[in-house]
């Protein structure tokens, strides 16, 4: 009888602190755990008693890589309570800042966190010795994404310009125009990225997933739409908690989210792509097809291609928005606070991000709930790990460990995000 | 060839935004790696080099017994240790727990307290070990980070000013949002470094760089009261990302 354990005490090239633990006995995988040991920070706890106007600034601090997602989900949930409907150029500016975040976050992940796995490097800096042009292209793409976030939001990490009802101030058309040339370069670079990553080797894994994402009737989703899946889920954002719940697992400081009816599910770029392929512009669809994809992809390793396709989409969409932009007369809509409950889901780079708030008639937050994408994917990551470990048991231990790490990085996990919400779960018990 | 100094980046309770700032130095990153050896940076690389380290950048605050022990080891392995960002220099947003009654709070929070090891307070790095320099901000500013690393490489003190956001606001030629529009602004008591972003975007500073040198928050609060800011809002204003920084902590308790 032989047994061994694959252990990675501190996962690299992911956001936050996580560990991997796989137990193998007699050539069978007996246990798989994605352990998250990031200390909890109790965001829901200190949101209680804060003014609703502070929510976008406070929740942004959950994650330095996707602060815009937290700001967007929070403002949409709170505007639902206040009865505000942000439309026209303000709505477009929100899509624009989100495009910037997708370009920045996906650019970081594709080039600096994920590609080194496929090419056998410990990091992008080592990869740059052999692939200097690719790494420079990735850095510049990321930079253009950051510039777009900073232009609309004031700075790239924890933007200061987003508020309930709109923005503190809005750019003039002439402020946005200088981005056009850069975004055209980025569009070409994104297309090259799609081509480059499609030449990588992808382990043949195609699990049967339930892909969950927003779907909007007219556009590839950022902030609005219904929550749908490829297995028949089609619900309003308000009904999220009727269909999803969290499980408490002792070995991790994050919770596992499941679909009550069917268990584990998948959120993120691949889910968005599969549920919304028809809404991508023809040029983006063509790039996907050229890269060898159809309108449906379920190999988690190919998420790097889908992320690159979403960079391309975000560049196209930014160019459209800037082209059509007219500066609105007022930077934000206003309403007196009133008591109520509001829900919001937006599409963070890593997948759907749910917020719910209850506020009183003074606008003070009484209760907050946040379900980030990484906790939604945790169960699916573990089942992928199981499958990848079984398929690769023959490999030497260092190679098996590496491919398991890569299987986790397929999800671009954001561990700080996944941990912050422990408090609320425990309160309900 | 002269040995390149070894850089390590460490994370405690935080959002990762400050260490991400290093990766956000897109134009400088590759050049930087020619001058400094990135020996330990888990967010960027699975390769690690053993200590001791010449320069350690520490992000995040100390919130668990395990992390209390870990920061001691890191201090011992680091020649020059810099706390980066509001979590590392002032306990961060998670230091809001420091203002609650933890004894009453814990049974409400933890269903399985035996699995959760957390301290009553979130403390800055300087509350645990000696720190050689503190870089402020939530998040830190990229230019200041590069200045810090350059200064380290050149063996000089970083040229980072401890004056207020008002200085930067004047240098940008902004019209004062508080004087002209009556918008409550923490600029007069807040450490510079952001480039007076919020007033530039027509909102009041919310203090994410923490207190400036010798701030006078009592005087600012008197002015904010005249502008009609109620007491409970004053408490909130001082209690955000740098709530545990002494001048802000003290001023917030005055209005409780």
Image (cartoon, coloured by chain):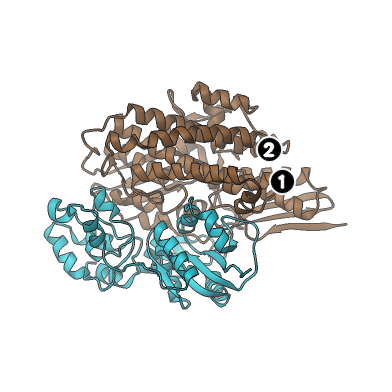
The label nearer to you, 2 versus 1, is 2
The chain ID associated with circle 2 is A
Disc assigned to residue B133: none
Q: Nearer the viewer, residue A185 or A290?
A: A185
Q: Quadrant of the N terminus of chain A?
A: bottom right
- Of all residues, the one furthest to the left in this rendering is B226
Q: Quadrant of residue B70?
A: bottom right
Q: Residue furthest right?
A: A1
Contact between marks 2 and 1 (CB within 8 A): the answer is no
Q: Residues within 10 Å of mark 2 (few under 14, many from 20)?
A: some
Asked whether A50 or A330 is in front, the reply is A330
Q: Which residue is mark 1?
A: A386
For this view, does A56 lie left or right of residue A348? Answer: left
Output the letter for the chain in brown: A
Residue B91, percent from left and from top: 41, 67
What is the display colour for chain B?
cyan
A264 left or right of A202 in image? left
Chain of the residue under the numbered disc 1 shown in the image: A
Residue at x 56% of width, y 36% of height: A308
> Around disc 1, counting alpha carbons within 10 Å, would you say few (fewer than 14), some (14 to 19), or many (20 or more)?
some
Q: Which mark is residue A200?
A: 2
| Element type at mark 2 | loop
State which quadrant residue B33 falls in.
bottom right
Q: Earlier in the sequence, mark 2 or mark 1?
A: 2
Find residue A189 and report its horizontal and vertical position in percent.
53, 35
């Amino acid at each position: 009888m032989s047994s061994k354990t694959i252990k990675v005490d501190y996962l690299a090239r992911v956001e936050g602190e996580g560990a991997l633990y796989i137990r193998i006995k007699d050539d069978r995988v007996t246990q798989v755990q994605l352990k998250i040991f990031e200390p909890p920070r109790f965001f829901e706890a200190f949101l209680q008693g804060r003014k609703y106007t502070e929510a976008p600034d406070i929740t942004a601090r959950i994650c330095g890589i996707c602060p815009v997602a937290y700001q967007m989900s929070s403002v949409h949930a709170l505007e639902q309570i206040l009865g505000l409907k942000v439309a026209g150029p303000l709505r477009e500016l929100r899509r624009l800042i989100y495009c910037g975040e997708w370009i920045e976050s996906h650019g970081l992940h594709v080039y600096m966190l994920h590609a080194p796995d496929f090419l056998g490097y410990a990091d992008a800096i080592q990869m740059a010795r052999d692939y200097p042009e690719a790494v420079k292209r990735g850095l510049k793409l990321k930079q253009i994404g950051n510039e777009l976030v900073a232009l609309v939001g004031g700075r790239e990490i924890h933007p200061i310009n987003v508020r309930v009802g709109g923005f503190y101030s809005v750019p003039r058309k002439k402020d946005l125009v200088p981005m056009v040339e850069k975004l055209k370069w980025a569009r070409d670079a994104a297309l090259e990225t799609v081509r480059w990553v499609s030449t990588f080797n992808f382990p043949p894994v195609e699990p049967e997933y339930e892909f969950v994402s927003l779907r909007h009737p007219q556009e590839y989703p950022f902030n609005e739409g219904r929550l749908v899946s490829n297995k028949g889920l089609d619900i309003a954002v308000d009904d999220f908690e009727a269909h999803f719940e969290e499980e408490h697992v002792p070995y991790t400081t994050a919770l596992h989210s499941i679909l009550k009816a069917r268990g584990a599910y998948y959120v993120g770029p691949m889910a968005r792509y599969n549920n919304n392929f028809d809404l991508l512009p023809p040029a983006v669809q063509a790039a996907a097809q050229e890269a060898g994809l159809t309108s449906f992809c379920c190999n988690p390793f190919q998420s790097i291609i889908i992320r690159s396709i979403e960079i391309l989409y975000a560049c196209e969409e930014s160019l459209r928005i800037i082209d059509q932009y007219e500066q609105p007369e007022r930077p934000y809509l206003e309403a007196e606070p009133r008591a109520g409950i509001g829900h919001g889901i937006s599409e963070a780079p890593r997948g759907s991000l749910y917020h719910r708030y209850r506020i009183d008639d003074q606008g003070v937050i009484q209760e907050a709930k946040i379900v980030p994408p990484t906790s939604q994917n945790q169960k699916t990551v573990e089942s992928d790990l199981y499958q990848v470990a079984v398929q690769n048991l023959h490999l030497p231990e260092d190679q098996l460990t590496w491919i398991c790490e890569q299987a986790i990085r397929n999800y671009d996990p954001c561990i700080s995000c996944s941990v912050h919400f422990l408090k609320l779960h425990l309160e309900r018990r | 060839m002269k040995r390149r100094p070894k850089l390590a980046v460490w994370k405690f309770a935080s959002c990762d935004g400050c260490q991400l700032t290093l990766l956000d130095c897109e134009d400088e990153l590759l050049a930087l790696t020619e001058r400094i050896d990135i020996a330990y940076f888990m967010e960027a690389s699975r390769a690690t080099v053993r200590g001791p380290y010449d320069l350690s950048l520490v992000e995040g605050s100390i919130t668990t017994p395990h992390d209390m022990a870990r920061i001691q080891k890191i201090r011992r392995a680091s020649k020059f240790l810099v706390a980066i960002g509001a979590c590392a220099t002032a306990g961060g947003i998670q230091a809001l727990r420091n203002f609650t009654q933890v004894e009453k709070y814990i049974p409400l929070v933890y269903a399985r307290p035996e699995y959760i090891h957390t301290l009553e307070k979130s403390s800055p790095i300087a509350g645990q070990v000696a720190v050689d320099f503190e870089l402020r901000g939530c998040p830190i500013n990229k230019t200041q980070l590069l200045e810090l690393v350059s200064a380290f490489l050149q063996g000089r003190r970083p040229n980072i000013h401890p004056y207020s956001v008002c200085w930067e606001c004047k240098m940008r030629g902004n019209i004062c949002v508080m004087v002209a529009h009556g918008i409550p602004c923490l600029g007069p008591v807040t450490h510079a470094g952001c480039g007076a972003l919020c007033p530039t975007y027509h909102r009041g500073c919310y203090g994410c760089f923490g207190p400036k040198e010798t701030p006078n928050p009592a005087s600012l609060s008197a002015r904010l009261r005249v502008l009609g800011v109620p007491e409970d809002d004053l408490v909130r204003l001082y209690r955000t990302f740098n709530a545990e920084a002494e001048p802000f902590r003290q001023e917030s308790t005055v209005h409780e």
